[in-house]
Image (cartoon, rainbow, N blue to C red):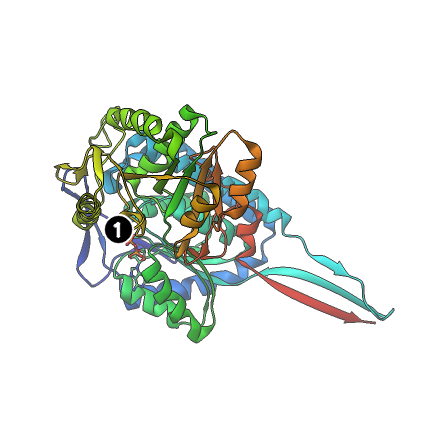
Amino acid sequence: MEKQLMYCNGEWIGSDNPVLEVTNPATGEVIATVPFGGKREAQLAIDAANDAFPHWAALSAYERGDLIRAWYDLVKEHEMELASIMTAEQGKPLKEALGEIQYANGFLSWYAEEGKRVYGEMIPATQRNKRLWVQKQPVGVVAAITPWNFPAAMITRKVGPALAAGCTVVVKPAEQTPLTALKLAELAEKAGIPKGVINVITGDPKEIGEVWLQDPKVRKLTFTGSTEVGKLLMRGSANTVKKISLELGGHAPVIITKNADMNKAVDGVIAAKFRNAGQTCVCSNRIYVHEEILDDFTTKFTAKVKELRIGNGMDEGTEIGPLIDEAAISKVQQHVSDAVQKGAKIETGGNLENGLFYQPTVLSNVNDEMLCMREETFGPLAPIASYTSEEEVIRRANDSIFGLAAYVFTENISEGIRIVEGLEYGIIGFNDGLPSTPQAPFGGFKQSGLGREGGHHGIEEYLEVKYVSLGF
Ligand code: ADP
């Protein structure tokens, strides 16, 4: 078993506290330990990032871009190794893990360039002897707290634009998946990113979070995770009025109209639903199918779901890996039994296979009162409900505290545009089950969060606007 250290101020350090064990969810085996950092390490990291900030911010965007690009090159060179680490600690199939590394690396290559396009503005003055302009500057030290479901991409999606903008960062990866994060830090160090610019602290979420929230040197907090913790961090940021970006829960509806291309819809929903065994915040949670095509869709979709192969993510051909832990299994079980009790029919699945492996499951005859239609399942459960009219389905789709991703499948462009415009969601997959990409803005309406990640919108989150009025 490997004993890992964490990365702070260009050094690999331990902590006085006991260690944190990292478990492979496919086997239950402890594969490594990482330091259980607390207040002291959290503070060291902020101080390091704060000391490194002036120099990093003073580099030109081209110089920073070269270093981020060098990091990208190393991640590319080590992508299989990173993917294996990810599968071992997180469980997703190796092919998906490799896909995530490439997606994650996309944020590095994209922001290495986008940093060069942080433009200012000249504003016409009222007086002849004045010149007014706007320039953008990095916000300062950024704290990034990330979840276990995307151990690499949730880090580069934050650190890429932060670094490109000229910010320095302290990162706390999820307890379940620190190894991918530490490997990324090792490659950043190798790429020549100066000490203190990136710091990765593993350990106690509450203690680390508390120190980062309290310290006024942390000027920006960026978080991906549960709505519950997001609200807590938002409240905690108020004392020092930090800028915040939050990517929180979702409850994605899918609308399949009678004008949908059936094959596209089936494949799109499979991709949107079963990626990472249903453990993503943009996974489809509610599938609304027009009543005229309900039986046809349910039959074809169920047939495809039956073909999905469950197994250890390391095994060739695995499509559904284990869930992350027992709590995740309990949540799926609770949603399935609640739905069945309220009249849903299990078309396939519905059982725990063994360990943390839950069968991909399709439920039909679902109604909006069932738990799975209101709360995020975060597992391989696909509930299918029918609808009659466009107005009705848009209303039902919007009847949620969440507003992250939604999907619509139709070949009728007018109908598609009406539905897209009616949906109160930040990301829409229109005949597309996999809309996420580094160059486009990702984020939610309502309680799904604040701010956007990716694209040119993503770098704005790490920039302050400075207005200058020059009199002469
Ligand atoms: P999930 O339920 O998906 O694990 P969480 O919101 O609990 O989502 O976790 C996302 C990230 O937030 C993880 O890195 C976790 O350690 C961190 N976290 C959890 N609780 C706190 C807290 N009180 N303060 C700061 N970070 C926290």
Frontmost residue, 2 versus 388: 388
Q: What is the number of callouts on the image?
A: 1
Q: Position of residue 193 (x, y in %)?
A: 46, 49
Residue 224 against residue 219 in the figure, above or below: above
Is residue 160 something that shows in the picture? yes
In the rendered image, the residue lying farthest to the left is 354
**Disc 1 marks which amino acid?**
Leu
Quarter of the picture holding the C terminus = bottom right
Q: Position of residue 298 (x, y in %)?
A: 31, 30
Frontmost residue, 135 versus 166: 135
Establish whether ligand 1 lies closer than 8 Å to the Cβ of label 1.
Answer: no
**Relative to residue 337, is residue 195 drawn left or right?**
right
Is residue 74 something that shows in the picture? no
Q: Quadrant of residue 36?
A: bottom left
Q: Quadrant of residue 297?
A: top left
In the rendered image, the residue lying farthest to the bottom is 239
Judged from the image, the quadrant occupied by ligand 1 is: bottom left
* Residue to which mark 1 is pinned: 371
Q: Could you tell me which residue is drawn at 28 percent across and 67 percent down? A: 207
Q: Position of residue 253 (x, y in %)?
A: 39, 44
Frontmost residue, 83 versus 93: 93
Residue 59 against residue 329 in the figure, above or below: below
The local crowd at label 1, few if under 14, some if 14 to 19, many if 20 or more residues have their Cα within 10 Å, is some
